[in-house]
Image: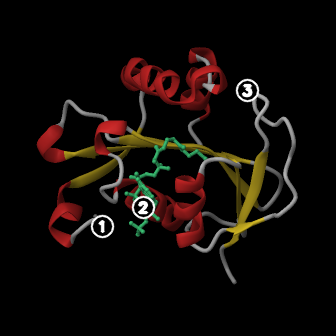
């Protein structure tokens, strides 16, 4: 189901703060298991605070719907190092909403013309989501990219094309 205008009114995107850490680390480990980012690394992302955003719904304040982490990569490039929607809320359009809003925020940054990310080759849902937003998949697989041994695709979006 896609997000409707009615639901969009209720969705709030905010910067993550240290109080969110416990829930974020829990979700991260639940989903990514041995590939999960550590608590220490998450703390560093919060401290650096480039774009570490969470999605909440005003009616469900206790629930963290999802989060996204964007870091500055090389010059003129940012990297989406993580995007996660709580399994209870997946496939309802929240991932699309969070990604779309994040792309809009990135477009407002000066001198950034490309967004890159890596995705597990088996993660067809995420690949579909990124392709929906015109990310292009590099066909060359980065072998053994993850701790699990799985390979990754590099996906890129030229934001001014
Ligand atoms: C990938 C993820 C962020 C997508 O979030 P989501 O809120 O479920 O996604 P949406 O509901 O916005 O759906 C986005 C697109 O993904 C695809 N999709 C989502 N759920 C799907 C499902 N169960 N089956 C098939 N396709 C699905 C669809 O193409 C959908 O677009 P459409 O409905 O317009 O066709 C979410 O599944 C997730 O957190 N997965 C675990 C973490 C992860 O893999 N993150 C990506 C790391 S690179």
At label 3, counting other C-alpha atoms closer than 10 Å, the crowd grade (few under 14, some 14-19, many 20 or more) is few
Q: Position of residue 18 (x, y in %)?
A: 43, 22
Task: Report the colour scheme.
Answer: secondary structure
Residue at the image point whose x is 23% and y is 63% from the top: 8
- Mark 3 beta carbon near ligand 1 (under 8 Å): no
Q: Is mark 2 within 8 Å of ligand 1?
A: yes
Residue 20 in view (yes/no): yes
Q: Is disc 1 surrounded by few (<14), some (14 to 19) or many (20+) residues within 10 Å?
A: few
Question: Mark 1 CB in 8 Å range of ligand 1?
Answer: yes
Quarter of the figure with residue 49: top right
Which mark sits nearer the N-terminus, 2 or 1?
A: 1
Name the residue at 73% across, 26% down: 148
Q: Is residue 51 left or right of residue 63?
A: right
* Secondary structure of the residue carrying numbered label 2: helix
Q: Specify which label sits upstream in the sequence, 1 or 3.
A: 1
Q: What's the residue at 61%, 15% (across, down)?
A: 40
> Disc 2 vs disc 1: which is toward the camera?
1
**Disc number at residue 96?**
2
Between 74 and 56, the one lying in front of the other is: 56
Closer to the chain start, of discs 3 and 2, is 2
**Residue placed furthest toward the bottom:** 161
Task: Answer with the quarter of the image where residue 151 lies.
Answer: top right
Left or right, residue 74 beside residue 92: right
Asked if disc 3 and disc 2 are in contact, CB closer than 8 Å, the reply is no
Circle 2 crowding by C-alpha within 10 Å: few under 14, some 14–19, many from 20: some
Report the number of discs: 3
Kind of element beneath mark 1? loop
Whole-percent x and y of residue 12?
28, 51
Residue on which disc 3 sits: 148
Q: Which residue is mark 1?
A: 2
Q: Are marks 2 and 1 in contact (CB under 8 Å)?
A: yes
Q: Is residue 60 above or below residue 153?
A: above
């Amino acid at each position: 189901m896609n997000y409707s205008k009615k639901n969009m009114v209720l969705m709030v995107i905010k910067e993550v703060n240290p109080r969110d850490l416990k829930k974020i680390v829990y979700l991260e480990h639940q989903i990514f298991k041995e590939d999960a980012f550590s608590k220490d690394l998450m703390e560093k992302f919060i401290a650096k605070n480039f774009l570490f955003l969470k999605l909440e719904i005003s009616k469900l304040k206790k629930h963290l719907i999802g989060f996204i982490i964007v870091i500055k990569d090389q010059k003129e490039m940012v990297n989406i190092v993580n995007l996660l929607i709580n399994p209870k809320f997946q496939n309802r359009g929240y991932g699309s909403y969070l990604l779309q809003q994040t792309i809009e925020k990135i477009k407002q940054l000066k001198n950034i013309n490309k967004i890159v990310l890596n995705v597990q080759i088996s993660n067809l849902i995420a690949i579909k989501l990124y392709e929906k937003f015109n990310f292009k998949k590099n066909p060359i697989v980065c072998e053994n990219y993850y701790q699990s041994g799985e390979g990754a695709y590099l996906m890129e979006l030229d934001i001014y094309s």
